[in-house]
Every structure is written in C-alpha cells, then in structure tokens.
Amino acid sequence: MSSTRIQSFRRETRRTLRARRRPLAAILAALAVVAAVQAARPAPPATQAVVTAAVDLRAGEILEPEDVAVVEVEPALVPEGALDPFDPPYGRSLAAPVRAGEPLTDVRLVQAELLTGFDTDTVLTTVRVFDPAAATLLEPGDRVDVIGSDPRGGLTAEVIAYDVTVVIPPAADDTATLGDGAPVVVAVDHATAIALADAAVRQQLAVLLRE
C-alpha cells in the first residue's frame, strides 16, 4: 500500500471517529447514569426464617405440622432462643400459650432437661386447673394432689393423682382465659398421665398443695 493510500485511510478513519464520538459519549454518559442510580438504590433487606405459631395454641398442646409455620422476617425481629426452622418442633409440648404469628422459642417448649432427677418412667403432662387463682400460688417443686369433680355435680370429687411434683406453674398471662383454666405442668408416671388426660375431658380439675 502506497503512502498516499495510507494517509487517505488514516484521514477517513479520523473522520469516522469524530463523527461517532458524540453518540458514543452520549451512550457512555447514559450508562454511567444508570450505574449510579443502581448503586444508590438501597439493597433489599436481608431476611431470616423463623418458626411461628400458625394458630392460637394452648399450653400443653403437642405440636403438629399444621400448628406451626415458617416465615421470613427481618433479623432484628428474631427473638433469642428462636427454634431452628430446619428442625421443626413436631411432637413437642408447649409449656405456655402462644398466639398465632408469635415466634416459637425454646422457653415455650417443655424441655427434656426438666425431667433430670426423676425416675426413668416419668413424663411431663399439663393439668388445666379450673381455679386460676389457686394455680398462681404454685411454685416449681411443689407437691400437689390433683382432684377431679363433675362440673354438673353428679359425681363426688375424687383424687386423680396423688403427690405429684409441679414442674412449671402457670405464668401470669396463662390465667387470663378462665374458661380453659390455668395450665400447670406436672411430673407423673405414664399411667397417671393417662388418667389425668381422661379426667380432663370429663371433669374440672383442682390441686391441693401438700406440705
């Protein structure tokens, strides 16, 4: 290629670049604006999965899959002791009532450690005491007799469980629903737990504090 042609090619190239410089500059400027807007836009807040009650639950209820839900919330809203969403608490018993939507924590569940020191056949069960005022007098470790009476007055009151240990007395907010009674978690053997469960559907239960 001769020097004349080379010079001509260079001139044409410069003309082409000058002609396209402004459109290219405009495109680059637009891209810079878009990038700046994207950078300034706040990132969506991170969320964390948490196990919540799907419905209102009473103390003593054994959790089933339909009782719980896993929802995404802001990390700041996750309480201490929140349950692991990858280890659902199915089959665990509630130690206190829970409202629908409330995150479930470890203190809301009856803990296996509570049975430490008891006989190997001991289980924890919940007694709903008809008189909440009497139940609020109880403390962990108290010994009580559980009495059943016919709400229609047709049967004489009888002792359902003798000398059982109170493990979890009712919290203050557990006594608000008088119709259901106040939940008291007690340690008993299997046979007594079955007897208490049977009495709970037929009788009103009360407790007598032993010395």
Image: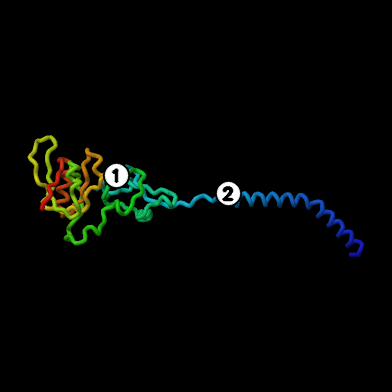
Viewer-proximal residue among 195 and 116: 116
Label 2 crowding class (10 Å Cα cut-off): few <14, some 14-19, many 20+?
A: few
Q: Which residue is mark 1?
A: 57
Q: Left or right: 132 with respect to 158? A: right
Q: Nearer the viewer, mark 2 or mark 1?
A: 2
The x, y position of residue 74, in whole percent, is 44, 50
Query: Residue 143: x and y, percent?
Result: 14, 53
Please name the amino acid that badge 2 sits on. Answer: Arg
Residue at left offset 84%, top offset 57%: 14
**Residue at 43% from the left image edge and 51% from the top image edge:** 76
In the visual, does 26 lie left or right of 12?
Answer: left
Q: Residues within 10 Å of mark 1 (few under 14, many from 20)?
A: some
Residue at the outermost left position: 156
Disc assigned to residue 107: none
Q: Quadrant of residue 113?
A: bottom left
According to the picture, the residue beneath numbered tag 2 turns out to be: 41
Q: CA distance from mark 2 to mark 1?
A: 42 Å
Question: Residue 158 sits in which quadrant?
Answer: top left
Quarter-of-image position of residue 12 = bottom right
| Residue at the image point whose x is 62% and y is 49% from the top | 37
Residue positioned most to the top: 152
Residue lying at the far front in this picture: please name it.
137
